[in-house]
Amino acid sequence: MFGDISGAGWGGLGEYVAVPDVALAPLPESIEFTSGAALPQAGLLALAAVGESPLDGKRVLVVGGGGGVGTYAIQLAVVAGAMVTGMDRAEKHALMRACGAEQTIDHRQTPLAAIAGAYDLVIDMVARGGPADYCRLLRRVGGPPSSAALSAPSCASRPTRCDATQVAGGSCR
């Protein structure tokens, strides 16, 4: 069995944990226990960030792409058809490329403020910026940004997805 018990009062370090059965699922035999243990939290956050819609030809920036959630987000976005750029320390660039990122950016060399208007979707796993930063990163297609932006701090229990008009209006937190 494996699952995400964050909504069940945590307590995952105990030898025995009582959780609702809907929080658990059988672990497929093809997945090792250690991999299955990491999947629910990081994998579900990445899925919430990327979404389940096709991203054919969309340009996606994953800030914190070399971390647990970011590596899942890169892979999910690539499978959905996106052209992905991962942003993290240079030491994590090979990992992000192995996950499918076409390009990588070292956040220590190129801050968010130096990038403008290049992406259709921004997923920030480390909360490096605020709504105005994300709005500047989004491509403009015939007017104000019309794509989605996401801020997903790694400590959040569920990322928030909002469209660019909400970002520009400051109503996305």
Image: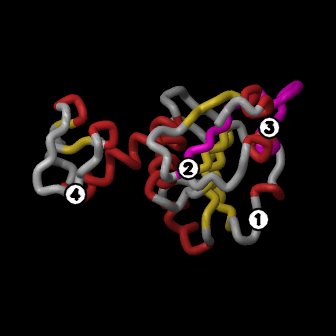
Find the distance from the CA under tag 3 to the CA under tag 2: 22 Å
Q: Residue at x 68, y 62 (%)?
A: 105
Q: Residue tagged by mark 3?
A: 139
Return the disc, 3 or 1, that comes first in the chain's sequence: 1
Foreground tag (4 vs 2): 4
Of the image marks 2 and 1, the number of the one nearer the N terminus: 1
In the rendered structure, find residue 110 and report the number of the disc placed on it. 1
Of the image marks 3 and 2, the number of the one nearer the N terminus: 3
User: Could you tell me which secondary element the residue under label 4 belongs to?
Assistant: loop
Q: Nearer the viewer, mark 3 or mark 2?
A: 2
Residue 145 in the image, given as x and y percentages of width and height: 80, 31
Q: Is residue 118 visible?
A: no
State the separation of the CA atoms marked 3 and 1.
18 Å
Q: Earlier along the polypeptide chain: callout 4 or callout 2?
A: 4
The disc placed on residue 75 is: none
Instruction: Choose top left, top right, bottom left or bottom right for residue 1.
Output: top left
Residue located beneath label 2 in the image = 153
Please tell me how crowded label 2 is: few (under 14), some (14-19), or many (20+) other residues with Cα within 10 Å: some
Determine which quarter of the picture holds residue 112: bottom right
Q: Which residues are magenta?
A: 136-153
Residue 150 drawn in magenta:
yes
Q: Amino acid type of disc 2?
A: Pro
Q: How many marks?
A: 4
The reply to whether callout 2 and callout 1 are in contact (CB within 8 Å) is no
Circle nearer the viewer, 1 or 4: 4
Q: Amino acid at mark 1?
A: Thr
Residue 55 at x, y percent in the picture: 59, 32
In magenta segment, residue 52: no
In depth, the one of 152 and 72 nearer the eye is: 152
Secondary element under disc 3, as helix, strand or loop, is: loop
Name the mark on residue 13.
Answer: 4
